[in-house]
Image (tube, grey):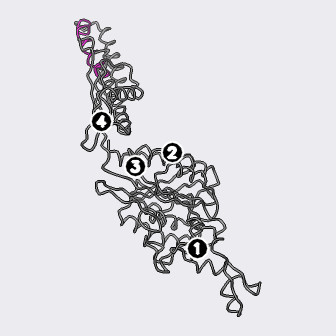
Amino acid sequence: MLRYLWLSFARHAGSFARSERGNFAMMFAVMSVPLMVAVGGVIDYSRASSARTEMQDALDATSLALSRQANVDTMTTAQMQTFATNYFNANFNTGNVINLTVSPSYSSTGPSVTVAGAATVKTTFLNLIGMTGVPINATSTTIWGESRLRVALVLDNTGSMADDGKMDALHTATHNLLDQLKNAASVDGDVYVSIIPFSKDVNVGSSNYNKSWVRWDLWDEVNGSCSRTWYTNKTDCENAGRRWTADNHNTWNGCITDRDQDYDTKNTAPSSSSTRFPAEEYSNCPQQMIGLTYDWTALNNKVDAMFPNGNTNQAIGLQWGWQSLTQSPFTIPAEDPKYDYKQIIILLTDGLNTQDRWYTSQSSIDARQKITCQNVKDAGITLYTVQVNTGGDPMSQMLKDCASTPDNFFLLTSANQIVTTFNSIGTALSNLRLKS
């Protein structure tokens, strides 16, 4: 638009200069300066507006960074000034400003950090009328301590994640997300994270073989030996009048299959037989899950250990993600009544459902998962769903509907998009806790 105005001005100026009628040349000479100032003023003010936008972005980054300093409440004025000035200058790259000031302050109310900025943008055209600069200013406040996060990462570890670089991208994306969540925490306990890898089953860890919440009847049925060797399960063996000897439970690999219906769609604490979690010796058992923790080293190590194998059962991953935020057999950290707690589940999968305890039909497994999705949302948990579709599968309407809002569903077509999507989610979660 500005270029159009300038070209239009130049074109008409030429016609005035060539005119032989009247005093157009004199009129043009008189009008040229105010016209140039008017058009040039738009350019100068546009530059000032852009500089103010860059200033606001730099102030937002500075106030957020300052709020993350563990000793911000005890910093001297000089220490705060040095930190804020250096951080702001590293993020503010506009060179045509003068008289730049950055003023940080801390308030125990909230608590909060405020960083104010002011500067003058040098003019080019307005300088013709004695206006040498346009003043700009902005302010950013970061309030923290109001919200705390509990985040469950429910991550597809099935065999197809080996294709197209998806598992490598998931490793990178999850490490980056963990860094974002760690940086959003001012003190230990501000953010807790659990990681639930899934395939057809989940892995609770073989060391839990003696826990009361593990159910053994399904495992005992097929893991053992018969006194007549050609019988391979307990029922056939005993129906033939033979003796079945179950394997020792300490040989179990830690895999868990779906609970009895309808407990497969709920977060009910395990107590009676139908609410307990059935052990299964699934040969493609995923990496062992980890419950809520702020041990960032352990979480990152868990990510590195994930590997692709097995069939897809999103529903069991989602149910265990919910369980990890709310209920035994996990140890749920106590909540401090002074804070507002936000619970989030991020479910990422690269394939459509293929197998669970009862079905090999996608529609049947989807139907169970739809119930779980609704139960999770009814419980006030924010649910993100990410479908990584590099193989030409149709979009999963179930996953789209599963998300808390349409904006919480992501359909990706390349592995690299996992990294950018997790970064976007991480930024949203950081902003949820640290309100700028």
Instruction: Where is residue 131? Give x, y as percent.
Output: 24, 14
Which residue is identified by label 1?
A: 279
* Sequence-wise first label, 4 or 1: 4
* Sequence-wise first label, 1 or 3: 1
Marks 3 and 2, how far apart at CA = 13 Å
Q: Name the disc covering residue 176, or none.
A: 2
Q: How many marks?
A: 4
Amino acid tagged 4: Ser
Marks 1 and 3, how far apart at CA = 35 Å
- Quarter holding residue 285: bottom right
Amino acid tagged 3: Leu
Which residue is identified by label 4?
A: 140
Tell me the magenta residue range: 25-43
Which residue is identified by label 3?
A: 429
Residue 31 lies within the magenta run: yes
Q: Secondary structure at mark 3?
A: helix
Please give the name of the residue rendered at 65% of the width and 87% of the height, measured from the top-left corner: 235
Amino acid tagged 2: Asn
Instruction: Where is residue 152? Give x, y as percent.
Output: 46, 58
Marks 4 and 3, how far apart at CA = 19 Å
* Sequence-wise first label, 4 or 2: 4
Quarter of the image for the N terminus: give it: top left
Marks 4 and 1, how far apart at CA = 53 Å
Of circles 1 and 3, the one toward us is: 1
**Contact check, label 1 and label 3, Cβ < 8 Å:** no
Amino acid tagged 1: Ala
Instruction: Where is residue 84? Give x, y as percent.
Output: 35, 29
In the image: residue 189, left or right of residue 25 = right
* Sequence-wise first label, 4 or 3: 4
